Image (cartoon, helix red, strand yellow):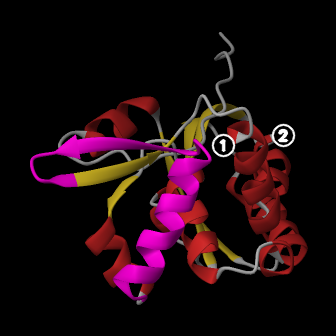
């Protein structure tokens, strides 16, 4: 869908990589390999996006690491557009709206790393979450967004233990006050 609006496939890959997850960064050579593109095409798009103020360069020894400029006036719009295109906004709202005592939900995996994927991975955190109902919602959401959805359920304590020593590649969080 995004290919209809933006003709550069390299630019689209950079947008997914850096604008879906604000924590993502990337080096020219790293993106060249990941995208299977020439360094010249990646450099050209990075330069265009830098000139537009959409990227922030982060010097790292003799290299430059690129990161989305979250202060750019269009950042939020681009981020929401990407989420809508891949269906994350519908998925999150559908799955998290009525599943029990949900405290937070995280998008993980490839999308959290800024890579497009046919599978969306979720971590749901809470107590007494209704798995049967979640499965029904997931089935409906998969039809809407035309992607496979996998999820894990954690209590907050389990998630804290799981994340110890792991990189947090989580781009979306919906906090909900725990009912007492």
Is 169 on the left-hand or right-hand side of 127? left
Position of residue 45 measured from the top left corner of the image (x, y, whole percent)? 53, 68
Residue 71: which quarter of the image? top right
Q: Which residue lies furthest to the front in this view?
A: 51
> Is 109 located above or below residue 139 in the figure?
above
Q: How many marks?
A: 2
- Magenta residues? 37-63
Position of residue 25 measured from the top left corner of the image (x, y, whole percent)? 37, 52
The residue nearer to you, when weighing 100 against 26, is: 26
Residue beneath the point at 85% across and 51% down: 94
Q: Residue 80 carries which label?
A: none
Residue beneath the point at 35% across and 59% down: 26
Residue beneath the point at 9% across and 47% down: 61
The residue nearer to you, when weighing 49 against 160, is: 49
The residue nearer to you, when weighing 138 against 30, is: 30
Q: Residue furthest top?
A: 180
Q: Mark 1 points at which residue?
A: 129
* Label 2: which secondary element: loop
Magenta-span inclusion, residue 87 = no
Q: Mark 2 points at which residue?
A: 98
Q: Badge 2: how crowded within 10 Å, few (<14), some, or many (20+)?
A: some
The residue nearer to you, when weighing 34 against 132, is: 34
Residue 125: which quarter of the image? top right
Q: Closer to the camera: disc 2 or disc 1?
A: 2
Position of residue 112 measured from the top left corner of the image (x, y, whole percent)? 50, 56
| Quadrant where the image shows the N terminus | bottom right
Task: Name which of mark 2 and mark 1 comes first in the sequence.
Answer: 2
* Label 1: which secondary element: loop
Residue beneath the point at 68% across and 40% down: 75
């Amino acid at each position: 869908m995004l290919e209809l609006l933006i003709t550069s496939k390299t630019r689209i890959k950079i947008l997914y990589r850096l604008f879906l997850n604000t924590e993502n960064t990337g080096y020219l050579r790293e993106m060249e390999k990941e995208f299977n593109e020439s360094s010249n095409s990646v450099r050209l798009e990075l330069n265009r996006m830098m000139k537009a103020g959409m990227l922030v360069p982060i010097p790292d020894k003799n290299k430059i690491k690129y990161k989305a400029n979250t202060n750019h006036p269009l950042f939020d719009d681009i981020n929401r557009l990407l989420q809508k295109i891949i269906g994350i906004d519908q998925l999150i709202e559908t799955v998290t709206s009525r599943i029990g005592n949900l405290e937070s939900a995280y998008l993980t995996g490839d999308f959290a790393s800024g890579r497009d994927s046919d599978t969306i991975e979720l971590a749901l955190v809470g107590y007494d979450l209704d798995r049967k109902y979640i499965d029904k919602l997931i089935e409906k959401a998969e039809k809407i967004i035309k992607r496979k959805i996998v999820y894990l359920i954690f209590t907050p304590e389990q998630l804290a233990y799981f994340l110890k020593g792991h990189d947090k590649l989580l781009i979306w969080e919906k906090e909900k006050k725990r009912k007492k």
